[in-house]
Image (cartoon, rainbow, N blue to C red):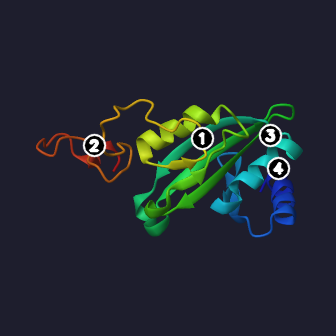
Amino acid sequence: MSELHDNLLQALEERFPGAVISSGDERDFPVFHLQKNQLIAVLTFLKQEKGFNFLTTMCGIHYPEQGDLEFALMYQLHNMVQNQRIRFKVFMPKSQLDVPTLTTIWPAANWMEREAFDFYGFKFTGHPDLRRILNMDEMNYHPLRKEYALEDAGRDDKEDKYFGR
């Protein structure tokens, strides 16, 4: 593990006991899996006290093979002064896709959250303008969920296995 990972893990465990489910280094990033109910408190702490003041990325992910915790939100933060980047993931079941908005901490989360709502169906409580951003309002599904076929079922040359599924 990296020194950054170890220092942050220690700080998070001291300040928020039980908030970190697991952690590790993936592709040179310290990665922390958090309890959903601790997300706002942990990210506020990281911004205000640890200098991670830039929300680089926030996106939805669908892992259908993970059973009950098949949906995740991934947050990447950057401490620009020390040039450090970290990643957080929050996993949840399909029946509980409600997550508190980060727009009160990072206003730039607005459009990222709208995209995750549009493509995956996450509901960000407290969001100032949660509506579709890229798809039509009339769509009654969320197209990046892996429960939908990638192509027309009538075509033999466009099976999902050709697209990495």
Q: Amino acid at mark 3?
A: Phe
Q: Residues within 10 Å of mark 3 (few under 14, many from 20)?
A: many
Q: Amino acid at mark 4?
A: Phe
Residue at the disc numbered 3: 52
Give the CA distance from mark 3 to mark 4.
9 Å
Q: Amino acid at mark 2?
A: Leu
Q: Position of residue 89 (x, y in %)?
A: 62, 54
- The answer to whether residue 83 is left or right of residue 148 is right
- Earlier residue among tags 1 and 3: 3
Give the CA distance from mark 4 to mark 2.
40 Å
Residue drawn at x 71%, y 60% is: 38
Give the CA distance from mark 1 to mark 3.
14 Å
Q: Which mark is residue 58?
A: 1
Q: Amino acid at mark 1?
A: Met
- Earlier residue among tags 3 and 4: 4
Residue drawn at x 79%, y 36% is: 53
Residue 107 lies in quadrant? top right
Q: Out of 118 and 23, give the one closest to the viewer.
A: 118
- The answer to whether residue 68 is left or right of residue 3 is left
Residue at the disc numbered 4: 45
Q: Residues within 10 Å of mark 2 (few under 14, many from 20)?
A: some
Q: Residues within 10 Å of mark 1 (few under 14, many from 20)?
A: many
Give the CA distance from mark 3 to mark 2.
37 Å
Residue drawn at x 88%, y 46% is: 49
- Earlier residue among tags 4 and 2: 4
Residue drawn at x 60%, y 56% is: 90
Q: Which tag is nearer the camera, tag 4 or tag 2?
A: 4
Give the CA distance from mark 1 to mark 4.
17 Å
- Earlier residue among tags 3 and 2: 3
Q: Residues within 10 Å of mark 4 (few under 14, many from 20)?
A: some
Residue at the disc numbered 2: 150
Q: Position of residue 101 (x, y in %)?
A: 62, 45
